[in-house]
Image (cartoon, rainbow, N blue to C red):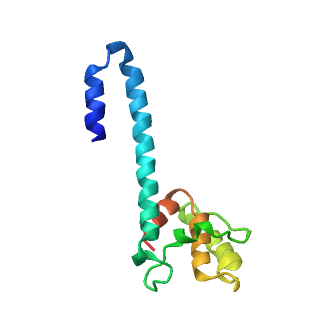
């Protein structure tokens, strides 16, 4: 539907206004994509199949409204040469912390991932 709208505007657009139209179109498309992503996230969170009570899968995004305790957590970018140091620090500061629930530990893991590691984590449905 959006494509049809843009195509019809494009046809009627004057040549001197074309560059402005294309830039505005790209901005609008980016906004629409971001809105779709947010809606999909919210739908995923509210899907009972992915609730925290489910033993087989846990969606840590549900906990995003919960304020996690302030804790130094290392970051991991997905580079293998940084893995050992990240793992040791993460285990010591998060995994071995008995006051943190498993779902909160998962939130800390997601929050500490960057770059390629974050892309991998995002591709997995919990």
70, 14: nearer the viewer: 14
Say if 8 sits above or below 1 in the image: above
Tell me which corner region of the image, top left, top right, bottom left or bottom right, holds residue 63: bottom right
Q: Quadrant of the C terminus?
A: bottom left
Q: Is residue 99 left or right of residue 79?
A: right
- Which x, y percent locates residue 103? 57, 78
Say if 21 sits above or below 124 in the image: above
Q: Is residue 126 left or right of residue 4?
A: right
Q: Is residue 117 left or right of residue 43?
A: right
- Which x, y percent locates residue 102? 59, 82
27, 72: nearer the viewer: 27
Which residue is found at the position 73% from the left and 68% from the top? 72
Say if 65 sits above or below 17 in the image: below
Q: Quadrant of the N terminus?
A: top left
Tell me which corner region of the image, top left, top right, bottom left or bottom right, holds residue 123: bottom left
Which residue is found at the position 41% from the left and 44% from the top? 32
Say if 105 sits above or below 11 in the image: below
């Amino acid at each position: 539907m959006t494509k049809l709208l843009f195509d019809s505007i494009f046809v009627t657009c004057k040549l001197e206004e074309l560059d402005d139209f294309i830039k505005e179109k790209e901005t609008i498309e980016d906004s629409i994509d971001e809105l779709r992503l947010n809606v999909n996230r919210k739908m995923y969170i509210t899907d009972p199949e992915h609730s925290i009570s489910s033993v087989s899968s846990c969606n840590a995004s549900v906990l995003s409204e919960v304020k996690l305790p302030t804790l130094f957590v290392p970051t991991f970018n997905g580079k293998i040469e940084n893995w050992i140091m990240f793992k040791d620090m993460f285990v010591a500061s998060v995994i071995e912390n008995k006051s943190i629930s498993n779902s909160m530990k998962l939130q800390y893991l997601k929050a500490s991932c960057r770059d390629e590691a974050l892309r991998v984590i995002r591709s997995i449905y919990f």
